[in-house]
Image: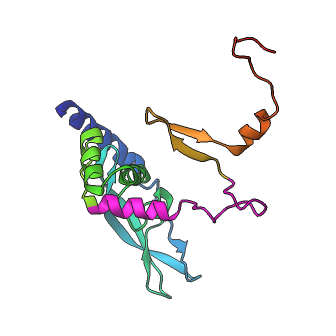
Amino acid sequence: MATRAGLHRAGAAILTPLLAEPGDPAPRTACACGAQARYHDQRPKRLLTALGPVQLERAYCVCPHCQQGQSPRDRELDVEGTECSPGVRRMMALVGAETSFDKGREQLDLLAGIEVAAKAVARHAEAIGADTPRPGRGSSPTTGRSSSPRISRSSFGSQVRRTSGLRRSTRNRTGKSSAGTNP
């Protein structure tokens, strides 16, 4: 465990400059209101990654029209409004979908050395689950069935993809007889 923690710290130290904004920040950036937000200053952000926490400095812009602040680098890194990297968010959603949120929190700590609250696991599992297609959404207009293949669990816990098209393609095909030979 100590070796893994040390490697995570080293990885996070290497990752920090890679996440830093390249070059000078742009003096202006587009705002959601349609105006141009202007560079204001540099602001720190703590980000939890699969390698551990990193601290980065990024440009902060303020729109003179609507007074909203934003960091273009947050948008680029897909970390707007969150302190977790996309990879950590996916991990939290996965463990949150498989077991209780508290058990998922324990699994993240045990397997990846990532310490988060059960509430964070719940928040990210629910947010990513809300974006997942459900029956009725994205279904075929002719059959009413979902156009995506179904995924189920095998007896060993691995995921197995099932499609109805496979059954149709093998319906009239002759197979081997009980003796193990082709008829």
Residue shown at the point (36%, 57%) measured from the top left: 84
- Of residues 170 and 117, the one nearer the viewer is 170
Q: In which quarter of the image is the C terminus?
A: top right
Question: What is the total number of numbered labels drawn onto the structure image?
Answer: 0
Residue shown at the point (36%, 44%) measured from the top left: 15
Residue shown at the point (33%, 58%) measured from the top left: 121
Left/right placement of residue 92 relative to residue 163 reads: left
Left/right placement of residue 87 relative to residue 35 reads: left
Q: What is the span of residues highlighted in magenta in the rendered image?
A: 119-147
| Residue 73 in sight | no
Left/right placement of residue 122 relative to residue 25 reads: left
Residue 40 x %, y %: 40, 75
- Residue at the extreme front: 178
- Residue 137 falls within the magenta-colored stretch: yes
- Residue 11 falls within the magenta-colored stretch: no
Residue 76 x %, y %: 50, 59
Quadrant in the rendering for residue 79 = bottom left
Residue shown at the point (69%, 61%) measured from the top left: 139
- Of residues 59 and 155, the one nearer the viewer is 155
